[in-house]
Amino acid sequence: AQSVTQPDIHITVSEGASLELRCNYSYGATPYLFWYVQSPGQGLQLLLKYFSGDTLVQGIKGFEAEFKRSQSSFNLRKPSVHWSDAAEYFCAVGGAGNMLTFGGGTRLMVKP
Amino acid sequence: NAGVMQNPRHLVRRRGQEARLRCSPVKGHSHVYWYRQLPEEGLKFMVYLQKENIIDESGMPKERFSAEFPKEGPSILRIQQVVRGDSAAYFCASSPLDRPNTEAFFGQGTRLTVV
């Protein structure tokens, strides 16, 4: 069975500071990995995805993520956080039938 | 180019009533997924449907919950005799293909409150 762990429930960073959100997964085959962002009261927007190839993936809004098979991780990064990045971030792994298994989410707060 | 449309956005039901949640997938998408998000939690898979078929309902409670995706019209998630614990956000997603590397597009969700 596949699973996703996001160890940090809440993270607070200052505007302009760098950001790294952690994601660890468990999956028996080649993982298909996703990061979604959810603003309050809204649906999910895809930030980026990894299927194969280059392990450093670029996404929208200046985000990137790095797949590390040896660590079963897919951490999300951004070099300089903006106040508008405050939201909840979900890591997910895709399996058979395109069903997604989500982590519990990390709520990001940005200090001015 | 409308995305996934869910309605209503907010739904309030008294205990024991029925809730019907609708999802219109992206035009041309034939795969629909329902997820539930309990307060302060991530999304949990409920059911996966293709037109007129339930493919996987392993995440759906065995009682009171049902889903359909008819040949014509939106997908419906139906919750009978709602209880307080059903209060959650219910998200629908659609995709054009049945492959794990295919992006699923999410709707904005229906927030169900049971009073």
Image (cartoon, rainbow, N blue to C red):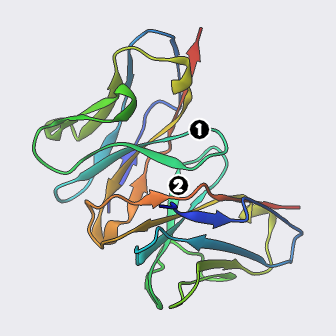
Vertical side of B103 occupied by A5: above or below: above
Horizontally, residue A41 falls left or right of residue B29, namely: right
Residue bearing mark 1: A39
Q: Quadrant of residue A54?
A: top left
User: Label 1 is found on which chain of the structure?
Assistant: A
Q: Identify the subunit bearing mark 2.
A: B
Q: In what element is the residue under mark 2? A: strand
What percent of the width, then of the height, locates residue A7? 43, 33
Question: Which one is in front, B51 or A1?
Answer: B51
Residue A59 placed where, x, y %? 31, 36
Q: Residues within 10 Å of mark 2 (few under 14, many from 20)?
A: many
Taking B37 as reference, is B14 above or below it? below
Q: Amino acid at mark 2?
A: Leu
Task: Give me the residue at 46% from left, 73% from top.
Answer: B32
Secondary structure of the residue carrying numbered label 1 = loop
Quadrant location of residue B115?
bottom right
- Horizontally, residue A109 falls left or right of residue B30, namely right
Check the image and report above or below for A42 versus B87: above
Select label 1 or label 2 by which is in front. 1
Q: Nearer the viewer, residue B2 or B50?
A: B2
Q: CA distance from mark 1 to mark 2?
A: 14 Å
Label of residue B43 in the image: 2
Looking at the image, the residue that sits furthest to the front is B1
Are the residues at dot 1 and dot 2 in contact (C-beta closer than 8 Å)? no
Residue at image x 20%, y 59%? A28
- Residue B84 image label: none
Residue furthest left as drawn: A53
